[in-house]
Each structure stands twice: as C-alpha cells, then as structure tokens.
Image (tube, rainbow, N blue to C red):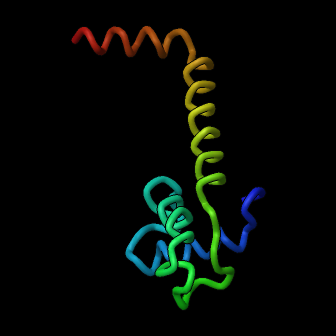
Amino acid sequence: AYNVGIGHVEDARRLTEKYGGDPDVWEGNVAKYLLLKSKLKYYTDPVVKYGYCRGSEPVNYVEEIFERFKQYKQLLKKPEDNNLQANNSVL
C-alpha cells in the first residue's frame, strides 16, 4: 500500500467484499478491484471513500514481489525436498 495509500487498498477491499470476493485475498480479489478503481462505476461507488486510483502500479509492484518470493522459495528448498518431488513424479 506504500505507493498507493492504505485508503485506496481499503476501498478495494470494500469493493471486493461488496461484489462477493474475499477482501483478505490479493490475487483475483483485492487486486482486481484496485485496478477497477480507475473506472467511474467503481471509484464513485458508495463504499469507496478515497475516489479515483490508478491501481496498475501497485498491482504490478505486488505481483513482482509475489514472483520474487516464489523464486526465493525455490532457491531455498531443501535438497531432500527436491529429491522427494523427483521421486514422486516417477511414481
């Protein structure tokens, strides 16, 4: 939220909940509505307190962080975890 502000993220969470999504899940939920806050229908919705937001920058930033996390996780896997996965794929 540091590059868009917590208020816009909270707006996106409220929109997510209003439209049946999970406000505690980023991918496909909060990220979707943060992007939609650049459209009149969404930034003028009664649950929105902070108005218009160009959400592409924070959404891209968070996606890059998630991707980096996945890469680090792969690098830090224990060798026995990798061997176990390789053995299970043969079965």
| Residue at the spot 73% in from the left edge and 68% down from the top edge | 6
**Residue sitting at the far left:** 91
Which image quadrant for residue 56? bottom right
Would residue 19 be found to the left or right of residue 62 on screen? left
**Residue sitting at the far front:** 40
| Residue at the spot 53% in from the left edge and 59% down from the top edge | 31
Which image quadrant for residue 28? bottom left
Q: In the displayed structure, would residue 3 be above or below residue 51? A: above
| Residue at the spot 47% in from the left edge and 61% down from the top edge | 32
Q: Percent x, y for residue 66?
A: 58, 40
Q: In the displayed structure, would residue 76 be above or below residue 30? A: above
Q: Nearer the viewer, residue 28 or 36?
A: 36
Q: Nearer the viewer, residue 6 or 34?
A: 34
Which image quadrant for residue 9? bottom right
Would residue 22 be found to the left or right of residue 6 on screen? left
Q: Percent x, y for residue 36?
A: 50, 68
Q: Nearer the viewer, residue 56 or 61?
A: 56
The mark tally for this picture is 0
Q: In the displayed structure, would residue 47 be above or below residue 3? A: below
Q: Quadrant of the N terminus?
A: bottom right
| Residue at the spot 57% in from the left edge and 15% down from the top edge | 78
Q: Quadrant of the C terminus?
A: top left
